Amino acid sequence: MSKDIFLITPPFTQLNTPYPATAYLKGFLNTKNIKSYQADLGIEVTVALFSKQGLQNLFAEIKDQQKEHSVNAARIISLQDDYINTIDAVMLFLQGKNPTLAHLICKRNFLPEAERFAQLDDLKWAFGSMGTQDKAKHLATMYLEDLSDLIKETVDEHFGFSRYAERLGRSANSFDELYTTLQQPYTYLDKILIDILQQRMEMVQPKLVAISVPFPGNLYTSLRCAQWIKQQAPSVKIVMGGGFANTELRSLSDARVFEFYDFITLDDGEAPIEILWQHLNGEKTIEELKRTFTLVDGKVTYINNTACADYNQGQVGYTRLQ
């Protein structure tokens, strides 16, 4: 299934509100007959991790460490069979595919409970007699947050559902700490991410990978993805865009970023990515790029062809996502 461009949202954004940027870009590329494939790797990593097989692998990894654990982590580990046997049903419920599970969850004898449940307010007051679905979603979220606490303590200190390695991303204006971390071996979550990325790259076989980085919490995983692509598929070009670049990288000067990315675009992505694609196909010169950082003679260079106008909303094809 060879495609021209592979559009990626890296882990993690809010799972209940998937970030739409790559889907919008896919709709635009469809109007230009540029073949693309779009994936939210944050969702894919979460589904892989929070599954029966995923939890079996997690608890096996923790067992192999043979470390001492906090009281909370020890409780979760002692209840691992309960977590393994309920996780698939809970994920289906949270995906809206098993709504009848709400009544069983609300009885409070179905899900294993650890420290997060001690923080619950009066649920009857909060949800009343009519809020079964919302109450069950709240309880299921606490259940996942308990597992998240276990993951952070045992296998990956950076883990967070929507803020993975956010501290590293927020210090990225200097890039030193983040760059050093990227030279370290893969974390447990990195391994899951890269395994999924490898499968997608083999399936899509793109010429260009476009990675949207909306928040600081997506930056580290975006760089891990780019790093792997550079190592394993060096002929593939990689471009970053998204909210983080738009706000934090407008005065970019550190050339080390381009060990991972070939290009970084700012603001609305439709015109810049179209021109970049044309440039990679020999149809445009590098001087014709729009709102794009790249290396020229080893120096970080910002290129903005102001003669090229942006598209208005009626031209970008947001309804053509298939």
Image (tube, grey):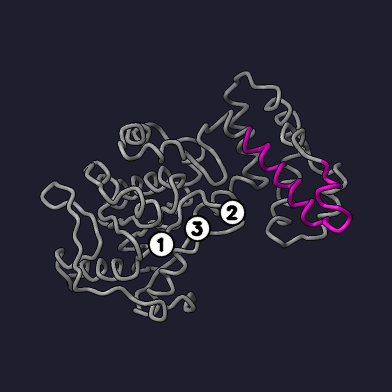
Image location of residue 221, percent across then percent down: 43, 45
Residue that numbered label 1 is attached to: 7
Q: Is residue 145 magenta?
A: yes
Q: Is residue 7 left or right of residue 256?
A: right
Q: How crowded is the residue under tag 3: few (<14 C-alpha within 10 Å), some, or many (20+)?
A: many
Choose between 216 and 47: the one closer to the eye. Answer: 216
- Residue 209 in magenta? no
The image quarter containing residue 306 is bottom left
Q: CA distance from mark 2 to mark 3?
A: 10 Å
N-terminal-most mark, 3 or 1: 1
Q: Which residues are magenta?
A: 122-149
Quick one: label 1 or label 2, which is nearer the N terminus?
1
Question: Which residue bears the numbered disc 3?
Answer: 40
Q: Residues within 10 Å of mark 1 (few under 14, many from 20)?
A: many
Residue 58 in percent (x, y) is at 61, 36
Q: Secondary structure at mark 2?
A: loop
Q: Quadrant of residue 253?
A: top left
Image disc number at residue 15: 2
Q: Residues within 10 Å of mark 2 (few under 14, many from 20)?
A: some
- State the CA–CA distance, disc 3 to disc 1: 9 Å
Q: Position of residue 257 (x, y in %)?
A: 27, 44
Dominant SS type (magenta): helix
Q: CA distance from mark 1 to mark 2?
A: 18 Å
For residue 252, side relative to residue 141 (left or right): left
Three-letter amino acid code of the residue under disc 1? Leu
Q: Residue at x 70, y 46 (%)?
A: 141
Q: Residue at x 44, y 74 (%)?
A: 27
Q: Residue furthest left?
A: 297
